[in-house]
Image: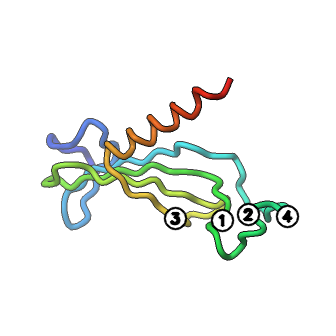
Amino acid sequence: MTARPTCKPWCDDHQSVGEDTCYTTFVIYDDGEEEKVEPPEGSFAALGRGLLPAEISWINFVANQEEEAENPSMLLEFYEAGERTASSTLELDADGLREIHSSLDIVLRKFP
């Protein structure tokens, strides 16, 4: 739908599903695998098959905010290769996303 004057600056897909909602999505990681691949025998993923989440092939960021909401709802969606339904999600707010960013920065500084 066309953006409205009340849309947020980050909104790139104004939706009307019961209520007016600003929406955006962005793939933040993609390993390029288009088809599911069985994990190598003896790998951590193979040992946990059926008990642990599958290996993640791509990660999608989604944000949406209803017109009356104070803050957007944010999700990190984790997908297996070839899948269009997330195998797991992590719901967070902007502060949670900043905390992940900060933690990753701290870890990466330890590597050359």
Tell me the residue that label 2 is attached to: 45
CA gap between label 4 and label 1 equals 15 Å
Mark 4 or mark 3, whichever is nearer to me: 4
SS state under label 4: loop
Residue at image mark 3: 88
Check the image and report above or below for 81 versus 29: below
Q: Which of the marked residues, 4 or 3, is nearer the chain's N terminus?
A: 4
Name the amino acid, label 4: Gly
Give coordinates of residue 28: x percent, y percent. Answer: 53, 42
- Badge 2: residue crowd in 10 Å (few <14, some 14–19, many ≥20): some
Q: Earlier in the sequence, mark 4 or mark 1?
A: 4
- Viewed as shown, does residue 20 lie left or right of 43? left
The quarter of the picture where residue 56 lies is: bottom right
- Tell me how far mark 1 sits from mark 3, CA to CA: 9 Å
Relative to the observer, which residue lies in front, 2 or 103?
103
Q: Secondary structure at mark 3?
A: strand
The residue at 69%/47% (across/down) is 32
Tag in front: 4 or 1: 4
| Residue at 58 percent of width and 59 percent of height | 79
The residue identified by callout 4 is: 42
Which of disc 2 and disc 3 is earlier in sequence?
2
Amino acid carrying label 3: it is Ser
Q: Image quadrant for the C terminus?
A: top right
Q: Could you say whether the residue bearing mark 1 is in a helix, strand or loop?
A: loop
Measuring from the top left, give residue 107's x and y in whole percent: 56, 34
Mark-to-mark CA distance, 3 and 2: 16 Å
Q: Which residue is mark 1?
A: 54
| Chain-order first, disc 1 or disc 3 | 1
User: Taking 73 as reference, is 53 left or right?
Assistant: right
Tell me the kind of residue under disc 2.
Answer: Ala
Packing grade of label 3 (10 A; few <14, some 14-19, many >=20) is: few
Name the side, left or right, on which 57 lies relative to 91.
right
